Image (cartoon, rainbow, N blue to C red):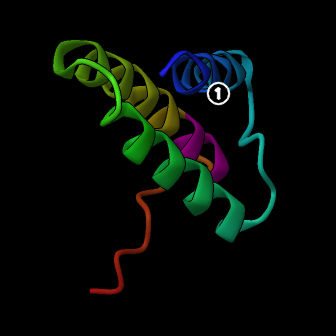
Amino acid sequence: MAAIRERLHATLALVKSATAMPWANTLVIIREENAFRFGKEALPPDEGAALWAEFDAEMERLYAAMNDGREPDTGE
């Protein structure tokens, strides 16, 4: 569990320090989000939820920057 926790904290630090999406490829972005989502499940529920909330907020910020403030295209 320590390795998972370290990876999640490292990924969180990366997105917090980023001014633009740190991964250029959409598939890599999805892979990193999924890795974080599933990794948090290995932690105690409160800790995992707190880390996910921080990560999700940072990703929203980065998606907004990536989309230049435009709403993402949901395909509707």
Image point (28%, 13%), residue name: 47
Tell whether 33 sits left or right of 19: left
Q: How many marks?
A: 1
Report the side of 11 relative to 41 (left or right).
Answer: right
Q: Is residue 47 left or right of residue 3?
A: left
Q: Answer left or right for 23 relative to 66.
A: right
Crowding at mark 1 (Cα within 10 Å: few <14, some 14-19, many 20+): some
- Secondary structure at numbered mark 1: helix
Quarter of the image with the C terminus is bottom left
- What amino acid type is highlighted by mark number 1? Thr
> Looking at the image, which is closer to me, 2 or 33?
2
Q: Is 32 covered by the magenta stretch?
A: no
For the view shown, which residue lies furthest in the left direction? 45
Whether residue 66 is visible:
yes
Magenta segment: does it hold 66? yes
The residue beneath circle 1 is 11
Q: Is residue 28 above or below residue 33?
A: below
* Span colored in magenta: 62-67
| Residue that appears at 70% across and 61% down | 28
Residue 26: x and y in percent read: 67, 67
Tell me if I can see residue 69 in this picture. Answer: no
Give how far across and how far down residue 50 sits, in percent: 28, 15
Examine the image and state in which quarter residue 17 appears: top right
Q: Which residue is at 60% across, 49% downward?
A: 32
Which image quarter: residue 75? bottom left
Residue 34, image x and y in percent? 47, 54
Q: Is residue 46 above or below residue 62?
A: above
Q: Is residue 52 above or below residue 23?
A: above
Percent x, y of residue 16: 62, 17
